[in-house]
Amino acid sequence: MRAEISIIKCRSALSPSRLPGLRYALNPYIGCEHACLYCYSPSTLRDEWMGLNWGKLVKVKQNIAEVLETELRRRPAGVVGLGTTCDPYQPAEAKFELTRKCIELLSFRNLSVCIQTKSSLILRDMDVIKPDGFEVGVTITTMNRKLAEKLEPNASPPEARARILEEFSSSGVRTWLFLGPIIPGVNDSQENFKQIVEVAKSTNSYLIYDKLNLRRWVLHRLGSFLDREYPGMKEQIPALLASGSGYWKKICTNIESICEAFEVECEPAF
C-alpha cells in the first residue's frame, strides 16, 4: 500500500545533528514510505499517529531546496547527514527529486555529505554524487529477501542494496555498510552476519553495526510480526537488550571476530 502524500513548506533545511561525525542533518521528507517495522525515527516527531502508523503518511518539504540555498550562504562548513530521520531516496523522491536538488546545492558549496539509504534509486544520482566530498552508506539488516520484505516492506531488496555499494565503491566514492538494527532472535545469526560482512568485503566498505533501539512505539510496531514469526521474542527482547544482560557484548565479539577474519574494518554505531 502506497503512503498518503502531503505537501508542506519548511522554515529551515539544516538542523544540528548529534550523530557521530555529522554537524548537520538534512531531511527532505517527514515520514518514510519504506515503513520499516523497527525504525525509531517516529519517536523524534512527537506524533503518536505517525509513530504507530509509520509508512502511511509522508510530508514533502516542497521548498527545501530554496531554503537550503539561503542557509548555505551563512552556515559554517561541516558534514551534512542526508537522511537521518527518513530515507532520502524513498519512492516519493522519484517524483519530487528534492534530494537530488539538495545534493546539487551541497556539491556546489563543496560541503561534505554523508548519505544513508536502503534504496537503489540513489543510483540515479551517480552523476552528482562524486568521490570528492561524498560518502554513501547502505543499511542491510539481512540478506534473506523474504525476511527483509517483512521487516522493510517498501525498501529495495538486499541484493539491490549490495549493488549500490558495489557501484559507488567502483566509482571511487567512499562506502560503508550499516548492519542494523540487530534484533534478538530475528537477524542475529552467525550466518546472517557472515553474509553481510562478505558484502562489505566485496565492496570495500567499512562496516558499522548497531542493536535494536527500543524507543517509543518501536516494539509496538514490531509486535505483530514478532508474535507471528518468532513467538515469545517480543517479551524477551527488552531484557536481552538491557544494560548488563551480556547479550550485546556477545554479539559485538561475534561481529568483530567475523570482520577480523574477512579483514573488514568495523565499529559499533555508538
Image: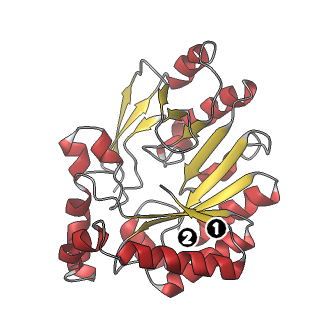
Label 1 residue SS: helix
How would you rate the neighbour count of disc 2 (Cα within 10 Å): few for under 14, some for 14-19, many for 20 or more? many
How far apart marks 1 and 2 lie (CA) works out to 6 Å
Disc 1 marks a residue whose amino acid type is Ala
Disc 1, disc 2: CB below 8 Å?
A: yes
Disc 2 marks a residue whose amino acid type is Pro
Q: Residue at x 69, y 56 (%)?
A: 175
Number of marks present in the image shown: 2
On screen, 229 above or below 214? below
Q: Residue at x 72, y 75 (%)?
A: 263
Location of mark 1 (residue): 162
Where is residue 190 drawn, in percent x and y?
Answer: 50, 86
Q: Residue at x 53, y 39 (%)?
A: 95
| Quarter of image, res 168 | bottom right
On screen, 243 above or below 76? below
The answer to whether residue 143 shows anywhere in this view is no
Q: Can you name the residue that lies furthest to the bottom here?
A: 191
The answer to whether residue 67 shows anywhere in this view is yes
| Quarter of image, res 71 | top right
How would you rate the neighbour count of disc 1 (Cα within 10 Å): few for under 14, some for 14-19, many for 20 or more? many
Q: Residue at x 58, y 82 (%)?
A: 194
On screen, 216 above or below 167? above
Location of mark 2 (residue): 158
| Quarter of image, res 23 | top right
Where is residue 227 drawn, in percent x and y?
Answer: 20, 77
Label 2 residue SS: helix
In-image side of 51 versus 115 (left or right): left
Where is residue 86 drawn, in percent x and y?
Answer: 44, 45
Where is residue 130 drawn, in percent x and y?
Answer: 78, 43
